[in-house]
Image (cartoon, helix red, strand yellow):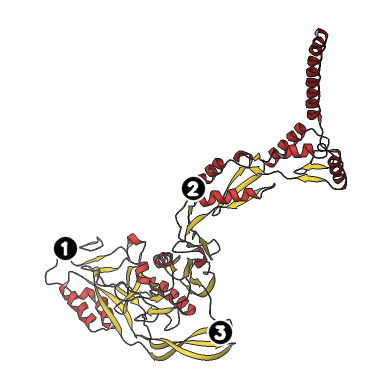
């Protein structure tokens, strides 16, 4: 019995040691087991690799793939991040066990079958990816800085004189939860490459859209007049008035008044005193020449076939357009106004430089291409001017005789619109009619004098409306004497004693009057 116990005590430790040795060998063998040929993970050939080596190779591939970018677009604004920055990871790592066991485990029949299958066709495994949802949300929420209010569109004049459009963009408000889900959904089917995701936003359209303003591209009508003969002051007024109209944008149904756009006529508003019509004569007033601006625009409006709601002719004819093509304005009295009766906005571009004034109206052309129009001025009667008009001028000495207005022929006239189709006249429509008064030559006559007799004589001559009588009184001024001689001071500073002296120009002066002054003849520019 003692001997058997000794044998048992020896065998049990030996068996245990043998089992431990076997288990240790099996563990080492498992760690050293290499993956069968023909196995790929996410395109990586892991044949002959251990499980650890395959894991390292796949992790390296995932990191490289994570350098791809995801671009989130909010409206027109892109925001970009790498997938690695969003915590990209390999999720289904359990496939390593399957890959490791394929063709190396199971009974001999199973192992043989797996190996033969691999010889016939590679076995490829796809990996699945996950990202950090918090990092996605943080990225999306950061895009809310691009929330915006709608911006109304505007039209501006480009360097080439044509209209350009800017603005007209929607207001955007980011929908965070919807956008986060859009990004998450994009990752579910991702297997490499860059991602682009349009974020969910709430859009609020502006009142004036870019789409609406983009219609402002066709020339509806243009007109040009010449002001090169104008004085500096009149040219300044023309250019100033043009600048106040150019750049006007009118939407369908909008009404435009030239008078409202260019007034007040004052130095503070950029105007100079220049000739203008007043009570059938030419006088200097602030804004003189502004009617050429309204007239030129009127002709562009006619060619655009916009609806004219107010227009008046001048009291006397002007020379920069044909009869009945003019449009006079006067603050609080006369206006040139029209309505945009088209289906789209219109934009007015004005140009005044170097003596040329032009207006071009842009909009959406809907008139047939084979249709054209022209405007015809028809004079229906003519009245020749007669007589003269003499105006006493108290701030000028006797001897001053100045023609301030040349004679103007009177006219009645009509303006007609001729309509053509394929070059053939199909209709004529009367646009307006005008009456221009015939006005004779106008003179200003100086009446300032200390000589009562001369004063009475010159005013009597003026009342006769006879230039010859005025000239006769001026020529004989030295014969008119006061009952009492006095010493006086002329308006220009020339002293005189006993009623007779000579001014700086060598003219004989009696009292305050020039006795031999020349008549000044002036033909002023058109108002």
Mark in the foreground, 2 or 1: 2
Relative placement, left or right, of 123 versus 392 is right
Residue 371 — which label?
A: 3
Mark 1 is surrounded, within 10 Å at the Cα level, by few (under 14), some (14 to 19) or many (20 or more) other residues, namely few
Instruction: State the residue lying farthest toward the top.
Output: 2
Instruction: State the residue lying farthest toward the front.
Output: 1
In this rendering, the count of numbered labels is 3
Instruction: State the residue lying farthest toward the left.
Output: 484
Which of the two residues, 321 or 358, is positioned nearer the viewer here?
358
Residue 423 — which label?
A: none
Q: Secondary structure at mark 3?
A: strand
Asked if the residue under mark 1 is in contact with the one under mark 2, i.e. CB atoms within 8 Å, the reply is no
Image point (76%, 35%), residue name: 54
Q: Is the residue 321 above or below the residue 267 in the image?
A: below
Q: Splitting the image into 4 quarters, where does residue 489 fall? A: bottom left
Marks 2/1: CA–CA distance: 91 Å
Q: Is the residue 289 above or below the residue 390 in the image?
A: above
User: Which residue is the site of mark 2?
Assistant: 144
Q: Secondary structure at mark 1?
A: loop
Image location of residue 393, percent across then percent down = 25, 72
Which of the two residues, 478 or 292, is positioned nearer the viewer here?
292
From where the camera sits, is residue 53 visible?
yes
Q: Quadrant of the N terminus?
A: top right
Relative placement, left or right, of 468 versus 169 is left
Image location of residue 127, percent across then percent down = 70, 43
Indicate which disc, 2 or 1, sits on the residue closer to the N terminus.
2
Q: Quadrant of the C terminus?
A: bottom left
Q: Splitting the image into 4 quarters, where does residue 503 fall? A: bottom left
Which of the two residues, 457 or 149, is positioned nearer the viewer here?
149
Mark in the foreground, 1 or 3: 3
């Amino acid at each position: 019995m003692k001997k058997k116990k000794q044998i048992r005590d020896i065998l049990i430790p030996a068996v245990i040691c043998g089992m431990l040795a076997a288990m240790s060998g099996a563990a080492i063998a498992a760690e050293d087991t290499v993956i069968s040929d023909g196995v790929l993970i996410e395109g990586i050939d892991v044949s002959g690799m251990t499980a650890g080596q395959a894991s390292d190779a796949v992790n390296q591939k995932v990191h490289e793939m994570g350098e791809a970018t995801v671009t989130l677009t909010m409206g027109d604004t892109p925001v970009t991040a790498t997938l690695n920055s969003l915590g990209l990871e390999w999720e289904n790592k359990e496939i390593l066990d399957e890959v490791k066991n394929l063709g190396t485990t199971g009974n001999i029949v199973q192992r043989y079958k797996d190996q033969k299958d691999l010889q016939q066709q590679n076995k490829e495994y796809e990996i699945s990816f996950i990202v950090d949802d918090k990092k996605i949300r943080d990225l999306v929420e950061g895009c809310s800085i691009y929330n915006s209010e709608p911006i109304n569109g505007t039209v501006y004049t480009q360097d080439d004189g044509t209209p350009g459009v800017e603005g007209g963009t929607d207001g955007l408000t980011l929908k965070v939860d919807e956008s986060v889900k859009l990004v998450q959904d994009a990752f579910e089917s991702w297997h490499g490459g860059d991602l682009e995701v349009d974020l969910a936003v709430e859009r609020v359209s502006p009142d004036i859209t870019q789409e609406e303003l983009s219609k402002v591209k066709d020339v509806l009508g243009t007109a040009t007049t010449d002001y090169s003969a104008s004085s500096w002051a009149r040219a300044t007024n023309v250019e100033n008035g043009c600048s106040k109209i150019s750049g006007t944008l009118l939407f369908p149904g909008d009404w435009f008044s030239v008078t409202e756009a260019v007034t007040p006529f004052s130095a503070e508003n950029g105007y100079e005193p220049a000739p203008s019509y007043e009570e059938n004569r030419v006088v200097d007033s602030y804004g003189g020449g502004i009617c050429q601006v309204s007239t030129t625009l009127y002709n562009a409006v006619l060619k655009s076939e916009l609806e004219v709601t107010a227009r008046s002719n001048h009291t006397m004819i002007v020379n920069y357009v044909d009869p009945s093509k003019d449009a006079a304005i006067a603050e609080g009295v006369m206006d040139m106004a029209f309505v945009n009766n088209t289906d789209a906005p219109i934009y007015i571009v004005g140009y005044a430089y170097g003596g040329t004034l032009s207006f071009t109206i842009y909009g959406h052309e809907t008139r047939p291409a084979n249709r054209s129009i022209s405007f015809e001025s028809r004079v229906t009667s003519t009245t020749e001017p007669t007589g003269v008009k003499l105006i006493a001028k108290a701030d000028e000495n006797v001897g001053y005789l100045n023609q301030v207005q040349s004679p103007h022929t009177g006219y009645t006239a009509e303006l007609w619109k001729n309509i053509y189709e394929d070059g053939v006249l199909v209709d004529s429509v009367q646009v307006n009619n005008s009456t221009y008064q015939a006005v004779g030559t106008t003179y200003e006559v100086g009446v300032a004098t200390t000589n009562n007799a001369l004063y009475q004589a010159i005013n009597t001559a003026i009342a006769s409306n006879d230039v010859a009588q005025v000239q006769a009184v001026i020529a004989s001024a030295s014969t008119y004497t006061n009952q009492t001689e006095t010493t006086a001071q002329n308006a220009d500073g020339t002293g005189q004693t006993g009623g007779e002296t000579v001014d700086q120009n060598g003219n004989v002066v009696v009292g305050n009057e020039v006795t031999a002054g020349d008549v000044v003849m002036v033909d002023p520019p058109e108002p």
